[in-house]
Image: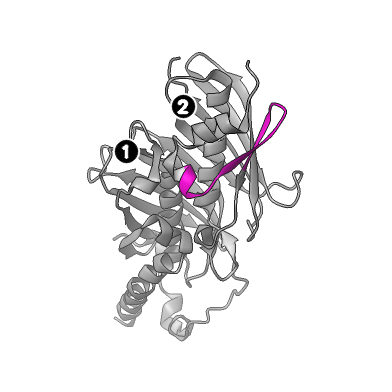
Amino acid sequence: MEREKIKQQKLERLWQLAPQFIEGTPHAEFLGMKFVAIDFGRATLSLPYAKKLIGNAQTKVLHGGVLTALLDQASGLAAVSAFEEMRPVATLDLRIDYMRAAAPEKTIIAEAHCYKVTRHIAFVRAIAHEGDIDDPVASSQASFMTTGASSKPKDPLLRTKAAKDLPPASKVKP
Amino acid sequence: MSVLSESQIAEVLSRIPYAQELAVRPLLMGDELTLILPYAPHIIGNPMLQALHGGAVGAFMETAAIVQLWLMGEPKHLPKPIGVNIDYLRRGTTKDTYARAVIARQGSRVANVRVRAWQDNYDNPISTLHGNFLIAKV
């Protein structure tokens, strides 16, 4: 039961901190990204359409780079939430497939899933869509590296004995 | 191929509102094009480390690829990205970033492009991109 409680507290902390992860990132703010949801190893963000984000003035379609930034940010948040202790991460590499043009005026939703973490590396897949995940605009595969040097949890909550019994975040099924 | 001018390239960039928003500008030396992404606080991704956002650098390199392809073929429509791979090699710092694109292979419909982005030293790129782009018919 103690385990469940710690897991719950950890999740609540994630929900508290995740919006700041977006608001505290100048470029994410600049693009207008919004926090939607978070879970262990999972994150969802949205990006409302804006004229300044257009990649082709003729067709009014979003710039591919805007999707790159959104998928990178969502994937980074999923990576942060997958580690035992939350740590800042840096993108190592990112591959994006652009399946179709984003429809003008539509909000983009990015859903990221960190399916594996090692001690310092996180592997994340993400999909960008306009409401129907089966009709994706783009998908990505990325890896992240932790940038914090600490190996001991600073969080007092995670130093408790019960915290050690927690399954790795990536194995927790929502 | 006709002689390029910076105003011609600026004209292509004006068709890409997001590149305008990032204030991307061209630097032309003979037929070699370098794009400049001027540093601005809003392209920061990690305020603690003062590191550039990977998405901003990625968007910049993608723009370099698109502009380079447009200049080579001058198609009616801007090329569209199909898939790109980005490697982040170093932290981008609070300085101007440069990018140069090389077309590795150009077919009739698809072109493969390699882009390098650097700050202090061309030989120490902060990031590289390679990807395939759909070239619209001329």
Q: Which residues are magenta?
A: B19-35
Q: On the picture, is B88 further left or further right than A8?
A: right
Could you tell me which secondary element the residue under label 2 belongs to? Answer: loop
Q: Secondary structure at mark 1?
A: loop
Question: For this rendering, which residue is in front, B6 or A163?
Answer: B6
Name the image colouring: one colour
Check the image and report above or below for B131 versus A124: above
| Label 1 sits on residue | A102
Q: Residues within 10 Å of mark 1 (few under 14, many from 20)?
A: many
In depth, the one of A23 and A163 nearer the eye is A23
- Residue B13, compared with residue B54, is above or below; it is above
Q: Give x and y (percent) for residue B135.
A: 47, 21
**In the image, residue A102 lies at what x, y percent?**
32, 38
Out of A31 and A154, give the one closest to the viewer: A31
Can residue B29 be found in the magenta stretch?
Answer: yes
Pointer 1 chain: A
Q: Nearer the viewer, residue A87 or A19?
A: A19
Q: Report x, y in % for residue A141.
A: 46, 45
Side of A19 relative to A161 (left or right): left
State whether residue B99 appears in this view: yes
Crowd class of label 2 (few under 14; some 14 to 19; many from 20; radius 10 Å): many
In the rendered image, residue A96, in percent from the top left (x then y), is placed at: 46, 40
Q: Amino acid at mark 2?
A: Pro
Q: Which residue is denoted by mark 2 in the rendering?
A: B79
| Amino acid on which the number 1 mark rests in the picture | Ala
Q: Count the labels in the image.
A: 2
Q: CA distance from mark 2 to mark 1?
A: 15 Å
Q: Residue furthest toward the left?
A: A132
Residue depicted at x 36% and y 69% = A19
**Is disc 2 in contact with disc 1, using a CB cutoff of under 8 Å?**
no
Q: Is residue A142 above or below residue A16?
A: above
